[in-house]
Amino acid sequence: MTKNCLEYCTYVVREEEADAYRNAGIDDMLVIPKDATLECGGKVHSFMSTLYWIIENTPEDVIFVADDDIKRFCYRLDNYTAITAENYPDWKERTCDEILRIGQLLYDLNLGLAFDNPQMALYVYDKEFCFKGMPGHVRWINKKALKARYDLKDPAISDVDMMLQELLMNRVVLLPKYFHSYGIQASNEGGTTIDSRKNYEYRCAMKNKWGKYYEFDFRKNTAKINVKR
């Protein structure tokens, strides 16, 4: 679905899945070798290890990484406007321009990480950009400024942990509130599995690592980032 929203993109696929993607008409691919490892020695086996593999194995200074199930991109200001052919004749170009603009901001500010937010309600919009929040379906990485690191022995490793690492060391991340993606909502955030036991262990690991800066309400299945400026 994501491919249909953009002027161009590269699919990141595992070696054993590459032929299936080619048969489906996907030609521009970055293929992860079967026994791929990260620079730290960890195997590529999960969402976060795949993200760090992409960071380590792409030539660009700034990259945009999106989930493969995005239905559309949207503007959210006083009103909610989908960036589609019905609303904009140049909708794909417009989408890519917004993505490039945010990437340029990240580079100019010498920050390491930007991402959208999974919360798509209108009432969430109160400013164009925020400096913290829960990662959603897309993220921008400025490799030269990124200070978050992958630790294969850390049970808290996730995109939320990545964001908190950046807040700790770079002080600010970029979260555009006016522009976001609309994809399939997962039942939990942070790139963790849906398995309840593993999910619980991940939350405990996050709490042990980040203490008062991370809270999770198990009843509502919602997390809170307690970082103030």
Image: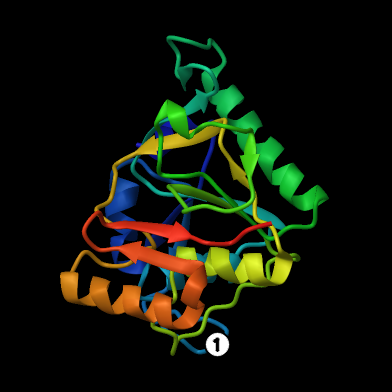
Graded by Cα atoms within 10 Å as few (under 14), some (14 to 19) or many (20 or more), the crowding at tag 1 reads: few
Q: Residue at x 57, y 30 (%)?
A: 178
Q: Nearer the viewer, residue 163 or 144?
A: 163
Residue 174 picture location, percent across and down: 64, 49
Q: Can the viewer see residue 178 in this picture? A: yes
81 sits left or right of 201 in the view = right
123 sits left or right of 176 in the view = left
Task: Give the structural element (helix, strand or loop) at label 1.
Answer: loop
Q: Residue at x 56, y 67 (%)?
A: 164
Residue 136 picture location, percent across and down: 44, 48
Q: Is residue 94 above or below residue 9?
A: above
In the picture, the quarter occupied by the C terminus is: bottom right
User: Total of numbered circles in the picture?
Assistant: 1
Residue 111 picture location, percent across and down: 73, 58
* Residue ranking furthest to the right: 108
Q: Is residue 123 above or below residue 173?
A: above
Residue 215 picture location, percent across and down: 40, 66
Report the colour scheme.
rainbow
- Disc 1 marks a residue whose amino acid type is Cys
107 sits left or right of 119 in the view = right
Q: Nearer the viewer, residue 37 or 66?
A: 66
Q: Residue at x 26, y 67 (%)?
A: 193
Q: Is residue 39 above or below residue 8?
A: below
Which image quadrant for residue 221? bottom left
62 sits left or right of 39 in the view = right
* Residue ranking furthest to the left: 196
Which image quadrant for residue 26? top left
In the picture, the quarter occupied by the N terminus is: top left
Q: Residue at x 58, y 53 (%)?
A: 132
Q: Can the viewer see residue 57 in this picture? A: no
Q: Is residue 88 above or below residue 63?
A: above
Label 1 sits on residue? 40
